[in-house]
Image (tube, rainbow, N blue to C red):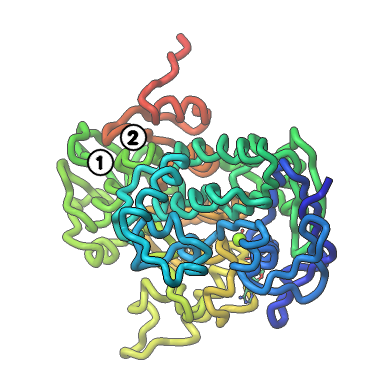
Amino acid sequence: MTVLSVSEVSKTYGATRALRGVSLDLAPGEVLGLIGANGAGKSTLIKVLSGATRASSGSVRLAGRPFEPSGPLDAQAAGVQTVHQNIDDGVVPGMTVAENLTLDGFGRGGSGWFVTRGRIRERARPVAADAGLLADLDAPVESLSPSGRQRVVIARALSRAPKVLILDEPTSTLSAAEADALLPRVRELAGDGVAVLYVSHRLSEIEALCDRVVVLRDGRARRTFTAPVDRHAVVAAMLGDLVPDTSTTGKAVDTSESVLTASGVTARPGGAPFDLRVRPGEILGVTGLVGSGKTELLEQFFGARPLLSGTLTLGGAPYRPKDPGAAIKAGVALVAEERAARAVVPGWSLRAHVSLPRLGAHTVAGVLSRRAERSSAEEVVRLLAVRTSGVEAAIETLSGGNQQKVVVGRWLTGSPRLLLLDEPFRGVDVGARADLGRVLRGRADGLAVLVASSDPEEVLELADRILVLHEGSLAGELRAADATAERLTGLMAGTPAREPS
Ligand SMILES: Nc1ncnc2c1ncn2[C@@H]1O[C@H](COP(=O)(O)OP(=O)(O)OP(=O)(O)O)[C@@H](O)[C@H]1O
Ligand SMILES: [Mg+2]
């Protein structure tokens, strides 16, 4: 049986052929994974199915009938609920959490009704409870963190008893624990007969959740796998012959000198002081649950918040940045969390985004050198294989993962001594994650990198050495070669597995 049938769907944006004749079927009760490299066309397909955009050609059938939604409301009314990759497409700012949870068809049919705050809260409560959302229902939705907003959007979609539920990277802003809570809910809905289309760059999620997996590459559906899927075959289908080489991970580093040393530092108030150092050419991973103090630690090293305790040295000299400007001057760069909210300026070109943090470097007698800007931007595109029509393209025409590559990659064209990366992989595909690792490692200038991520698998992919934080204190330090995801997860949760003796 088929509930949703996609037939030969194509979509072009100017000269970009985002989808080229994609066909797939979705059965009731099935979880179909949709995976592909950044820019492969996943979100474009989802925008067609959700009524956010129209296909250039091809057709879709829903429950046997032609399905050509005139807009998102139309698709929702027909039973297709979508959680978009860009969370802020799903929340209405200026409204409370409760209002966002109960938004009824975005204002349809509400006229003439006097709906009290109390009534809305009453309706929102079970929706929140069902999704395990503990947020203050009367808070403005924009006061929530990205993961909080994401959970509001997901909770609303789950509550609507759709025929087809579409989730575009629902977990990319969630912590590992929040993601772990979502997956059983999705399975449960499928158990009730909902057809689910699920996009993720986290292959372990795809393996745990999906009955079948369709791999998109360059706008085409290349292969379909049936569970249990073979991860290597899936990655090969995704990336073609560009399968990443991770053989350089965990290489030995020169242990004699340090770029950064920290003595007696504290991740967050209440945590126990600890020491750390990052050596030239080394990638040090810091992992821990949300709230374990990863971001706070990085922000202290960047001068974005005062040092809670202890002392730092950079390149052997005392280092105590009074603000981020001082840190940048000293050769320290931070790529902050929350791509969409803080780092991307809609309407600005890719080129402008590359020069944004370092306007000074491209200024000659106060005039920005367009040529220098262009060549930096082209370097980022080349280093990280950013998929774009060119460096003058507006940032919002790039796929989500490619926007993230620009935000991270722009720091690589300068010459920082210490690069601090906070959750750099949100929405970045497995091939690009490996590219980034190779670029960071291949530098001859001894760049030291500190990378924070709440996903133990990502840390394992990139880091040479890994620190695990638990509630603001150091729970363990491991060489990547000796670590496993299970061991890291145990340390993160404060329940380390017994060391083999
Ligand atoms: N509004 C737009 N204008 C021009 N090109 C666009 C637009 N939206 C998407 N594209 C292009 O279409 C292609 C597919 O993008 P899409 O967002 O579907 O990729 P994706 O598979 O979802 O990638 P990611 O994993 O990074 O989210 C990309 O080359 C992208 O640059
Ligand atoms: Mg996408």
Q: Position of residue 306 (x, y in %)?
A: 17, 52
> Label 2 crowding class (10 Å Cα cut-off): few <14, some 14-19, many 20+?
many
Left or right: where does residue 297 sit relative to residue 60? left
Query: Is 483 above or below relative to 10?
Result: above
Query: Is 177 above or below relative to 325?
Result: above
- Which comes before the other along the chain, label 1 or label 2? 1
Q: Position of residue 8 (x, y in %)?
A: 84, 65
Q: Residue at x 71, y 49 (%)?
A: 243
Per the rendering, the mark at residue 267 is: 1
Distance from mark 2 CB to nearest ligand 1 atom below 8 Å: no
Q: Residue at x 67, y 47 (%)?
A: 196
- Which amino acid is tagged 1? Ala
Q: Residue at x 75, y 36 (%)?
A: 230
User: Looking at the rendering, which quadrant does residue 64 occupy?
Assistant: bottom right
Query: What kind of element bears circle 2?
Result: strand
Query: What kind of element bears circle 1?
Result: loop
Q: Position of residue 153 (x, y in %)?
A: 48, 55
Q: CA distance from mark 1 to mark 2?
A: 8 Å
Quadrant, the N terminus: top right
- Which amino acid is tagged 2? Leu
Query: Is 326 above or below relative to 474?
Result: below
Per the rendering, the mark at residue 469 is: 2
Q: Is residue 257 visible?
A: no
Seen from the viewer's position, the closer of residues 479 and 90 is 90
